[in-house]
Image (cartoon, rainbow, N blue to C red):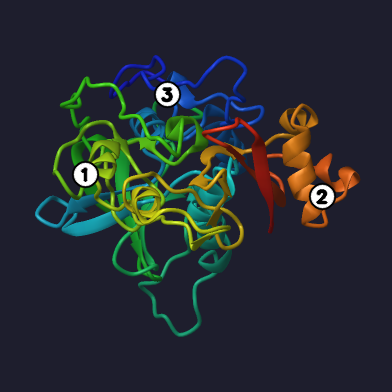
Amino acid sequence: MAVHDGPSSAPSTSSGSAGDVEPTRTAGATPADGDVGGAYEAELRRCEIAIGIRLPEALRARLGRENGFTIDDEAGPTGTRWRILPVHDTSTPARDRATTDDVTRRTALARASLAVTPPGSGPAATAFPSDGVVIGLGVSPLDLLVVRPDPVTPGVLGQALHRRNGSRPLEDLGARFVDLAPDPGPFDSGAPLPRFRYHERPDLTGAIRRSVRACSVCGRRRGWIDPLGPDAVCPWCIAAGHDAGTCPEFFDAPVPAEVEREVRHATPGFLGWQVERWLTHCGDAAVYLGTATHEQLVHLPDARAALRAEGIDEGTIATIEPEGELLAHLFRCRHCGVHTAYADPA
């Protein structure tokens, strides 16, 4: 990867006291270009293996910073607002769900369902090219943004953009991906990430991610947004009390009203398989640490006891991983340091 939107080093955030359990980001994967967010290099490669060719470098670089995004080209050469597809990211349940409709899936559907000319579609209809790759969708799910192999460089998709609308012939749009999605330039903030009392490292849990998008509240492109809610809200605006839109459904015990307000409206949330709930301890909301690995749980008897109290036996606890079908959302008490958790089955 050759393009960075911001510093590749870890952001400055609170990291807790010695002996704290570090939340996990992803098992066995390396973020593309060293960034915390965007598409992982492993996910980019998996997509390329599935489609049989390397993605265009400009698209690859942009997906490495923002895995799926929108290009408004209504006033441009294509006259369309395009949703650029992500690559499938299975590192967390939230990312898995958000990226299921990806480049690989849409390309496979196009090659399968459009490979044969539809009956009665007339002489203008043509088969979808076997070497075409769908990278985006227009207003209609049948309006496909397509790229094909580079005529000069073998094994790599070219920059030239094509359109396949329904069963119509492939149309050369006379534009390249870089014409529609230029590098947006540097971010306008070098400030460290804000510290959250009840969500210690949202940059590692996936609650905030690197992004080129502007914040929907302040309008600034500061390099980070909450990708889980309906709007793109930067962590600075979340800290200021602008709800990120990913509040827990409920707390497991009553907490003071000011604590509930802070968690619901000034703390990055998280997503799981089922209804999200925020655990409490010592009369306060606990600190969210992310989805636990089995290796972490081996050293956290209190968290394992909490899972057993929910009917999860030790054999099942041994199968828990952040990308698995049974998750353990891990918390730590702000006052006594006890770790607790709850089970979240798919």
Q: Who is closer to the viewer here, 195 or 234?
A: 195
Q: Nearer the viewer, mark 2 or mark 3?
A: 2
Asked if disc 1 and disc 2 are in contact, CB closer than 8 Å, the reply is no
Q: Residue at x 42, y 43 (%)?
A: 148
Quote the CA–CA distance across marks 2 and 3: 36 Å
In terms of secondary structure, where does tag 3 sit? loop
Q: Which residue is mark 2?
A: 308
Quarter of the figure with residue 319: top right
Disc on res. 215: 1
Mark 2 or 3, nearer chain start: 3
> In the rendered image, which quarter contains the C terminus?
bottom right
Judging by the rendered image, the residue that carries numbered circle 3 is: 35
Q: Position of residue 180 (x, y in %)?
A: 21, 42
* Mark 3 nearby-residue class (10 Å; few <14, some 14–19, many ≥20): many
- Residue type at mark 1 is Cys
Q: Given this view, does label 1 or label 2 mark the residue nearer the observer?
A: 2
Question: Where 192 falls versus 161 (above or below)?
Answer: above
Viewport quadrant of the N terminus: top left
Circle 1: is it few (<14), some (14-19), or many (20+) Cα within 10 Å? many
Up/down of 143 relative to 294, above or below: below
Relative depth, front residue between 12 and 126: 12
Task: From the viewer's perspective, tell me whether residue 69 is left or right of residue 320.
Answer: left
Q: Position of residue 275 (x, y in %)?
A: 56, 63
10 Å crowding of disc 2: few (<14), some (14-19), many (20+): some
* Residues at marks 3 and 1 touching, judged by CB atoms closer than 8 Å: no
252 displayed left or right of 63: right
Residue 136 or residue 308, whichever sits in front: 308
The location of residue 342, given as percent across then percent down, is 67, 50
Label 1 vs 2, first from the N-terminus = 1
Residue 52 at least partly seen: no
Along the line of sight, the residue nearer the viewer: 330 or 316: 330
